[in-house]
Structure formats: structure tokens, C-alpha cells
Amino acid sequence: QVQLVESGGGLVQAGGSLRLSCAASGSFFSIATMGWYRQAPGNERELVAIITSGGDTNYADSVQGRFIISRDNAKNTVYLRMNSLKVGDTAVYYCTGVNEYDFTNTHYWGQGTQVTVSS
């Protein structure tokens, strides 16, 4: 069973930075597209960034140029470096992964980590 465990959330002032980490269990990670979503109160969960097993990345327009997603396959870990944080980035951030060879496209999710940006 795939397990994803996030860490690194917290409280930061606007303009500051945080780095989120997500550790994945087993051999799943090397063949998975990994990503970060976020959900603010009253809003739907939205995509923040994804990274394929080959290292290709894609970002939401709202974070392009401020956030960087990366992965360390040796550590089975995906990161989200968040710079120039805004109050509007406040949300619960969820790590997700999908096996690129799984035709069912099943997504696995972490438990979420809270990011709060104060003005």
C-alpha cells in the first residue's frame, strides 16, 4: 500500500518562504507522477504543481515563478519550495502521486499539511 507523508507546513509572514516535503513508501515513487494540491476553506482542491518521473514539471498560473517542485528519487521524496508567499497561498497542502503505468489512474494522497501566510 502506498503511503505519502507530508511535512514542512507552518506559519510564515507574507514574502517569506517554506519548503514542503512528501515522503513516499515502497517502489511506487520511481514510476509515479507526483504533485501538490491545496485547499483553502470554502474552496475546491486545486492543483499547485506536478512533476513526472522524468522530471517534467507543470505549475498553476498562480504560483508560476514563485514555487518550485522537485524530487529526489533516492529518498522517495518530492518537495515544494514556496517563495514570495502571499496571504492567498494559505491552505492545506496535499501531496499526491499516481503510478504512470496504472491505467486506472488511481491517485494516492497524503494527510495534508497546513500553510498559513500572515500579512
Image: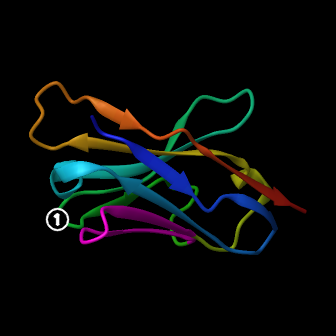
Give x and y (percent) for residue 35.
39, 50
Q: Describe residue 113's horizontal placement relative to residue 79 as left or right.
A: right
Taking the spot 66% from the left edge, 58% from the top edge, the residue there is 9
Taking the spot 47% from the left edge, 41% from the top edge, the residue there is 110
Give x and y (percent) for residue 30.
18, 58
Q: Describe residue 20's horizontal placement relative to residue 58 as left or right.
A: right
Taking the spot 74% from the left edge, 32% from the top edge, the residue there is 41
Three-letter amino acid code of the residue under disc 1: Gly
Rendered image quadrant of residue 63: bottom right
The magenta span reads 66-81
Disc 1 marks which residue?
54
Give x and y (percent) for residue 36.
46, 50
Q: Tell which of 96 and 48 is nearer to you.
A: 96
From what the image shows, is residue 89 above or below residue 67? above
Q: Does the magenta stretch include residue 31?
A: no
The extreme right residue here reads 119
Graded by Cα atoms within 10 Å as few (under 14), some (14 to 19) or many (20 or more), the crowding at tag 1 reads few
